[in-house]
Amino acid sequence: MIAAFGTYDARKHPRVAVLVAGLREHGHEVVELNRPLGFSTAERVRMLQQPWRLPLLVLRLLACWAGLVADAAALRRRSGRPEAVLVGYMGHFDVVLARLLFPRSRVVLDHLIFAGDTASDRGATGLRVRLLTALDRVATACADVVVTDTEEHREMLRSPGKGVVVRVGAADEWFAAADAAQRTRGEGDPLRVVFFGLFTPLQGAPVIGEAAAMALAAGVPLELTMVGSGQDHAAVRARLDGSPAVTWHDWVGPAELPALVASHDVCLGIFSDTPKGRRVVPNKVYQGLAAGCVVVTSDTAPQRRTLGEALVLVPPADAAALASRLGELAQPDRLAQARARARAGRAAVRPRAVVEPLVAALATVSAR
């Protein structure tokens, strides 16, 4: 038995749902001990960057932990000790509690985000980054197995040997959205392109804005949907605002997002040349593929290595290259070729496929 444990919110952060679904497909019994904290990733990072917000986080965390302690006791009475405890995404604090509650179980931490690295990418410096880096080290030290999403992130661990690389993957609702989508593109219809995200420096949204402006100025038949808000949103909107070819959504709920993405031809990934941007394969790349889109993203080592021919790759931070590639995809034959390659890569992002390295690690790692 595996206990999926923590204050994660699988609706907002579907990574843990992918892991749970994949483990179940491999025949593991997975019981969820989950008390969602109720904060988004951006809110958690903001609290860690702004210490005066921490009391709210602490109070909410303690309330959730009280429920988790009761849930853990009930599980032990009902079913005994779990063989492994999977601590969900953003579980920097939860993994400490898991280690205390389940001292003889294998503790697996899904360490998709390094707090120090993320804060640094969003502009933090000095003591805050050092404290968050120390938090990363404490969290990973509490785990027997640390799950990362790329080899580059595994190498950032103090003990890389306990790391296992598991692709992020996409939840089943993204595949269902692709199956339900009606994609009919007539002669002369514009290329439908979507971007969704938090507009952080990692994502390189200003590159998208500049590329879209260049493509539209060159006469590329293009309809662009931009979803989200954040640090770079104002700059991108200033570059594209007023264009009838661009539709803006400040927010689309998790339940509606897969269908919206699936209604487009192309899903855009990330395009920055920041250090973090060169180490990650973002959620939207996996989700865009699952939704049946052609995914255009930056040509970085982890993205090329992870999904290779399934993606359309452009140099990082190169707006002209992105604009040129969108112009090519506006041609029906080039779009059809890219779609065929994307379809061939979809199976690799299903939950059953992505968890295979974790299944292997659980079979070999001994409990403390």
Image (spheres, rainbow, N blue to C red):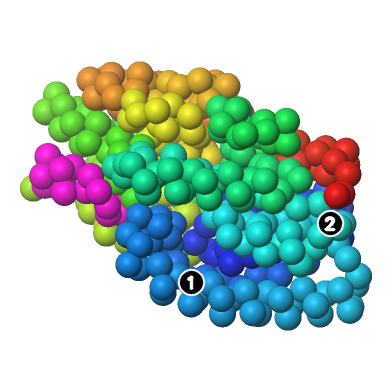
Amino acid on which the number 2 mark rests in the picture? Ser
Image spot of residue 293 (x, y percent): 46, 38
Q: Residue under label 2, please give it.
A: 105
Quadrant of the rendered image containing residue 268: top left
Boundaries of the magenta span: 227-241
Tag 2's secondary structure? loop
Residue at image position (88%, 38%) is 364
Q: Report the Cα–Cα distance between label 2 and label 1.
A: 26 Å
Q: Relative to residue 194, is residue 112 drawn left or right?
A: right
Amino acid on which the number 1 mark rests in the picture? Val
Q: Which mark is residue 163?
A: none
Residue 245 visible somewhere in the drawing: no
Residue at image position (22%, 20%) is 320
Residue at image position (61%, 34%) is 157
Seen from this angle, which residue lies furthest left?
242
Quadrant of the drawing holding the N terminus: bottom right
Q: Residue under label 1, please give it.
A: 58
Residues 261 and 280: in front is: 280
Q: Is residue 229 above or below residue 134?
A: below
Would you call the spot at circle 1 few (<14 residues within 10 Å), some (14-19), or many (20 or more)? few
Image spot of residue 104 (x, y percent): 86, 58
Residue 112 is inside the magenta segment: no
Residue 286 visible somewhere in the drawing: yes
Would you call the spot at circle 2 few (<14 residues within 10 Å), some (14-19), or many (20 or more)? many
Residue at image position (47%, 39%) is 282
* Number of dots carrying numbers: 2
Tag 1's secondary structure? helix
Q: Relative to residue 83, is residue 96 drawn left or right?
A: left
Residues 287 and 84: in front is: 84
